[in-house]
Structures are given as structure tokens and as C-alpha cells.
Image (tube, rainbow, N blue to C red):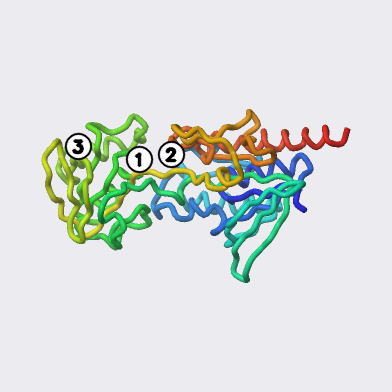
Amino acid sequence: MFDVIVVGAGPCGLSAAIELKKVGLNPLIIEKGCLVNSIYHYPLSMTFFSSADNLEIGGIPFTTVNEKPTRHEALAYFRTVVKKHHLELNTYEKVVEIERIENGFRVITSKRDGRGIYEAENVVLATGYYDNPHMLNIPGEDLPHVKHYFHDAHPYARERVVVIGGRNSAIDVALDLHQVGAHVHMVYRKSAFHDSVKAWVRPLIEAAIEKERIHMHWETEVREITPDAVVVEEKGVRKEIKADAVFAMTGYRPNLTFVERLGGQIDQETGVPVLSDDMETTVPGLYLAGVIATGHDATKVFIENGRYHGRSIARHIRDKRKVARI
């Protein structure tokens, strides 16, 4: 039996495992994809909003030649972290079920060679939110040319592309597409960009819109997607925008299925799990680390603050064990 199983090998999961090792526990990390799977699937040209020092975990410096680190630099950094801390990590193994047992949890996985069964006194869910896009729930959203993720702009050169959304990810996608020569329309339901838009990006997108290099549709709702168009309602007027590809950059939500199945309490209005100050759910021994703890508003926790969740979790488990021995 493991002391702790950490589900998810993103930065917050890795940080939790490191903190658990520091207090003498033996964590196993299980990840359904590759190491820092979400970062790997970010756009190829992505630059982080955070400075390198705000992404550091495990006391290992993160150096970069740029003001802000790139996706490529982050992948190299987190590989180094795993190596330096000798973390026990199973990749390409998906957790499909977590069950309560008398002295902890049974974790059942699906992997290349069949099924895995593990037991642990405690479980830390650090699964992030990037695997669970916020769906528009409109006709045509499941068409093959509609994407909720963006990897590279090159395939869309000279294509007609509609980008849905108006925050950082949507703006980055629109600018990347414009740079390769795509014909870009942005559709956003609000009348202005959010204050959270990156300061160095805002002038670029505003200039592109002003010069009509990117066509902006403010206060516009998407009603339907067809094989060759996006049907919108723009300030009360229904119209079609021709599109060869559609990027619905409408955000993501944490998947709280395991918390719900195990009986954990969740605020139904906000989607926020009920947690102690030590990140323990109402299910004893089940903890959350990172953005999974934020509910519907995934803008409150990032790597910068989620990386500290593991410290609280590790101390709580250590202290519980001390009490149990008395």
C-alpha cells in the first residue's frame, strides 16, 4: 500500500509529490498522458503569463533566456524536476475508478498492458481542468472542423477561421492565425476584452482589430455551427460568418467526478468542493491540489499559487499519522 497516490503529473501534482516526499511519505504519481500533459498540448508558440520564478517547484531554479518562459522551456524544466527529485511516476495510465476501502482507497487504472490496481491511505487529485472544455451546447459543436484546443496555426494559412471567445487563449489563437495569413473573425459575447488580458498582448490585438486585419464581432452570441459557417446573433441581428475552421476558446472546467462518486460535498451553484484549510475534501484522506479546487471559476488558481497546495497536504497527512501513532 502506498502512503499517497497523486492523480495527475502537472506542476501542482509534481509539487505535491515533492512535498510529500519531504515529510517522509512515498507518493506514486499516476498520469493518463505524458509528463505535464496539459503543457505539452498547449500551442507550440505559447509563452507563459507568469515569470519563470513563479513556476518553480521543488526548490529547483527555472532559468529562461526570455522575459517569460516558453512552452518548450517549461517542458524541459519539469523533466528536470522529476529527475532531480526521483519521483515515482506512471505515465499513459488513466485512473478510471477510485473506491473507498477500510484503510484508505483502491485506485483502478487502465493502461497499455491492461488494468492496474493500487491501494493507498490517501489520494491527491491534481487533474487540472484542461481536459474538460466548457461546451457551448449548440447545434454543430461536434462537427470535425470545430476545435476546443489549438496547437499550431500553419494548417490554417489562407483559411477562413472563426475564433470564439475574448480572453487570453482566444486572443493568442487569433493573432497566431493572422500571422500565417488566415482570414480571422473573432466572436465575443461581451463589449470589451477582460482586464486579465496580458498587457503586452492587448496593444497587438487592438491594433489588428482597428486595422481590420482581424474582424471583431462584439456583443455577439453563437447560435449554431454549420459545415461552412458560424450562425451568430450580433446585437440582435442574426447573420452567418463563413468558416473553414472554428476554434471555440471558451475556457475549461475541472472534472469533479471522483469527488462526487466518493461522496464529497460540492457547492452546487459555484461548483467549488468543500475543503478544509489543508485541501482535504469532506471525504477523509481525499485531497485536491491545483485548479481542480476552483469550481466553475478556473481563474483563481494557477501554477503560481496551486504549487503551494502540496505543502499543506503533506503537513496534514504527516500530522494525522503522528496522532494515529499516539
Q: Residue 49: which numbered mark, if any?
A: 2
Residue position for label 3: 218
Q: Secondary structure at mark 3?
A: loop
Give residue 194's quadrant in the image.
Answer: top left
Residue at the location (50% across, 35% down)? 294
Q: Amino acid at mark 1?
A: Asn
Residue 260: x %, y % from top left: 55, 43
Q: Earlier in the sequence, mark 3 or mark 2?
A: 2
- Left/right placement of residue 169 relative to residue 127 reads left
Q: How many marks?
A: 3
Q: Is residue 191 visible?
A: yes
Residue 179: x %, y % from top left: 26, 52
Q: Secondary structure at mark 2?
A: loop
Q: Amino acid at mark 3?
A: Trp
Residue position for label 1: 168
Q: Residue 81: which numbered mark, if any?
A: none
Instruction: Confirm or deny contact between disc 1 and disc 2 (CB under 8 A).
Output: yes
Give residue 47's quadrant in the image.
Answer: top left
Residue at the location (39% across, 53% down)? 43
